[in-house]
Image (cartoon, rainbow, N blue to C red):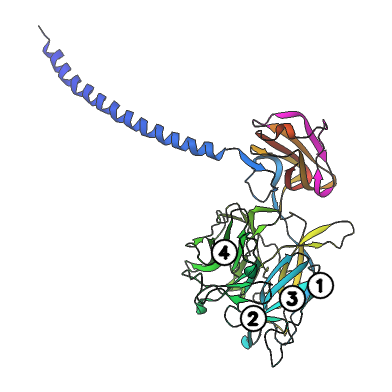
Amino acid sequence: MTNPKSQKANKFQIPNLKYTVQSLRSHFILFLIITLLIGIQGINIADDKTTINIGNRRELFVDQFLIDKTEGEAELVLHKPVMRGVVIVHDKPWEGNTCGYHTIFKDDKVYRMYYRAWHHKNKKEIHPAYVCYAESRDGIAWAKPDLNIVPFKRTKKNNIILQGKGSHNFVPFKDYNPKCRPEERYKAFGGEHKEGGLYAFSSADGVNWKLMSGKPVITSKPFAFDSQNVAFWDTERSEYRAYFRAWRKGVRDIQTTISKDFKTWNKPVWVNYPGAPIEHLYTNQILPYYRGPHIFFGFPSRYIEKRGSLVEGLFMSSRDGKIFKRWGEAIIRPGQNKDRWFNRSNYIWWGLVETHSDLPGAGNELSIYSNERYYKGEAGKIRRYTYRIDGFVSVNGSFKGGKVLTKPFTFTGRKLILNFSTSAAGSVKIALTNASGKQIKGFTSELYGDEISKTVIWKNRKNLSSYAGKEVRLIFTLKDADVYSFQFVK
């Protein structure tokens, strides 16, 4: 005979069993969902660790892109350019104290400079804006040729090349698109919001210009455009890229867009700077770095309205042209130069060119250009500043020393070229490792000195051809030293 208590107990247990089965089923489904999510996350993690194929391109230590980890006192360090002399004084009658938006690039053996010529007194316009042209053979001494194109006070004996629409912020470039027509070898942007947007210009010789369309080609809202809006042909991605100023929640910021023909442009997107504070950026000065065109550099101007509209240049870099690593420190302080402590008197202009160093035997360096004495006096000035080649940011080791391990990568070539600098007591030790970080016997080297392009000689005196295409890493052991860039070559 069944015990009534047992029956009661069984009746009590059966619902529990049912609940347990349902619970297990629910937990199993939850487990499957979590497993799926973990799997998806695992793919992302694997993607993050995907071997980087650097081929034979030059890689610069301007960000964390190639750095896996550091030990000791090793870190990325931002470098600042060296002040040089004044290269242009805008003292012609058609120029003045509000000349600006200078554009500089080297074209074969000639350095070209374009700029707005403008003058104000007590912030009132004395004459309208013109576009002027200057030339140089070395990027240091500049001449203003008489071009006989645009009249000023009944004479064409001047270096003016354009007036009217687009003259406020005319920014040219040389078009290296292989499909570019000869009559459009040079292109430019110009235009303000009051003119409806940015207009496209073209030229066969870089001096005589014409509109490519009667309508603006970029009219994005909330646009501003009263800035140095830039464009160029992106040789790595085979497209035109543009960067221009717009308003973003009440802050001056930068948008970018691309085009295949320079006339029809995609919908613009915002440039972003993860980890950087929200600040007014008046100009962007973005360009592909000529020694590593897969990397974009920018020298944007931080605008400080509450301090008398002061500006100062920053440095930023990007791998995709949209997300930038932006450093907070100014690369050019006004310093004790009183001409730079005025409204808009510390801009960096668009252009980065090689120039000769005045140090005997030092080779070339890189020049950028910046303005002084804006709105003050009768004539603005342009001063030159210089960097070492690739010398914007380095991975630096203190005297106590530090190590840098790169992420896994593959390369093509036989030799490793290094751009580095040490103190007399400092050193750079290099080791080639496999993907797991284990050093490969014989592939170690130690360097000291200061060279832009040093071929690394390995301990075993062998070249790297047997490791080309294989997954490897580099370890840099740094003592009072900087490494700026490296490249594998044939």
Query: Which residue is under mark 1?
Result: 141
Position above or below: 256 against 440: below
2 and 3 marks in contact (CB < 8 Å)? no
In this view of the protein, can residue 399 be seen by the observer?
Answer: no
Q: Nearer the viewer, residue 184 or 475?
A: 184
**Tag 4 secondary structure:** strand
Disc on the earlier residue, 2 or 3: 3
Mark 2, other Cα within 10 Å: few <14 / some 14–19 / many ≥20: many
Q: CA distance from mark 4 to mark 2?
A: 22 Å
Mark 4, other Cα within 10 Å: few <14 / some 14–19 / many ≥20: many
Q: CA distance from mark 3 to mark 4?
A: 24 Å
Look at the image and tell me in which quarter the C terminus lies. top right
Residue range in magenta is 434-463
Q: Nearer the viewer, residue 433 or 200?
A: 200
Q: CA distance from mark 1 to mark 2?
A: 23 Å
Query: What amino acid type should be assigned to the residue bearing mark 4?
Result: Ala
3 and 1 marks in contact (CB < 8 Å)? no
In the image, residue 452 lies in the stretch drawn in magenta: yes
1 and 4 marks in contact (CB < 8 Å)? no
Query: What amino acid type should be assigned to the residue bearing mark 2?
Result: Leu
Query: Which residue is under mark 4?
Result: 242
Query: What amino acid type should be assigned to the residue bearing mark 1?
Result: Ala
